[in-house]
């Protein structure tokens, strides 16, 4: 099949988010100006630079609520934390996607334990094995088909990294021990079950 997104696809569900897979889940913790904690998962998340490291998450708007709490909090405070969403925590990750009012602390709602960050104000999720403390660098606004809503890309510089020693093996992150959660399309999720190692090719090619 072929379709132009702006003209529709004719399928029971939009397939676009099932075509770029799997996607890491950015479990973003923020605070508002009064210190109220927000924790929300974002399937539109990734690393975008290595030196220095930068990450992005994309809070897409919805009719009636064009600006999500995570977006508002980063805009107000300039800080956020990426907590690793793991397979063992998948049910709690799912629970924190609840569209709760701004005054609700999703970390408390999901029964998670907040622990202080070293360099930024938002807390980390103690149960998560990896945390990236970030400071806001830039927000890019993208077009949205609904004039009453908005799409954004929020970019942050990673200023602090926490790695639980239990997921390190021989000085490297062990994916089997980490078991990150990944987003597929629709309402589907997955985890890493197989890994292969292959060095990058060099020039000139070798036989």
Image: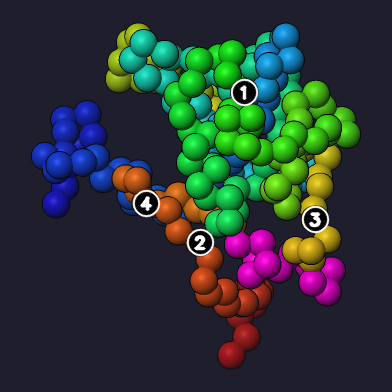
Q: Residues within 10 Å of mark 2 (few under 14, many from 20)?
A: some
Please tell me which residue is depicted at 50% across the width and 61% down the height of the picture: 191
Contact, CB < 8 Å: mark 1 with mark 4? no
Which comes sooner in the sequence, label 1 or label 3?
1
Question: In the image, which residues are magenta?
Answer: 169-179
Q: Nearer the viewer, mark 1 or mark 4?
A: 1
Towards the viewer: 84 or 134: 84
Q: Nearer the viewer, mark 1 or mark 3?
A: 1
Q: Is residue 2 left or right of residue 156?
A: left
Towards the viewer: 29 or 50: 29
Marks 3/4: CA distance? 27 Å
What is the secondary structure assignment of the residue under circle 1?
Answer: loop
What is the secondary structure assignment of the residue under circle 4?
Answer: loop
What is the secondary structure assignment of the residue under circle 2?
Answer: strand
The residue beneath circle 3 is 164
Please tell me which residue is depicted at 57% across the width and 77% down the height of the picture: 196
Residue 191 numbered mark, or none? 2
Q: In the displayed orientation, state which residue is furthest to the right.
A: 118
Q: Residues within 10 Å of mark 4 (few under 14, many from 20)?
A: few
Which comes sooner in the sequence, label 3 or label 4?
3
Asked if residue 127 can be seen in this view, the reply is yes
Q: Position of residue 136 (x, y in %)?
A: 71, 24
């Amino acid at each position: 099949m072929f379709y132009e997104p702006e003209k529709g696809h004719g399928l029971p569900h939009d397939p676009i988010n099932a075509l770029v897979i799997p996607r890491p889940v950015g479990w973003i913790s923020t605070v508002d100006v009064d210190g109220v904690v927000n924790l929300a998962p974002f399937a539109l998340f990734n690393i975008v630079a290595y030196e220095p490291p930068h990450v992005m998450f994309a809070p897409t708007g919805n009719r009636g609520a064009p600006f999500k709490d995570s977006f508002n909090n980063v805009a107000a405070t300039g800080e956020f934390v990426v907590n690793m969403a793991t397979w063992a925590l998948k049910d709690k990750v799912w629970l924190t996607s609840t569209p709760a009012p701004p005054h609700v602390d999703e970390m408390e709602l999901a029964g998670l334990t907040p622990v202080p960050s070293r360099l930024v104000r938002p807390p980390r999720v103690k149960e998560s094995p990896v945390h990236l403390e970030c400071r806001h660098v830039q927000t890019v606004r993208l077009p949205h088909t609904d004039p009453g809503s908005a799409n954004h890309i929020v970019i942050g510089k990673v200023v602090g990294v926490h790695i639980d020693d239990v997921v390190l093996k021989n000085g490297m992150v062990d994916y089997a021990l980490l078991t990150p959660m990944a987003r597929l399309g629709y309402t589907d999720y997955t985890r890493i079950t197989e890994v292969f190692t292959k060095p990058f090719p060099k020039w000139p090619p070798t036989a």
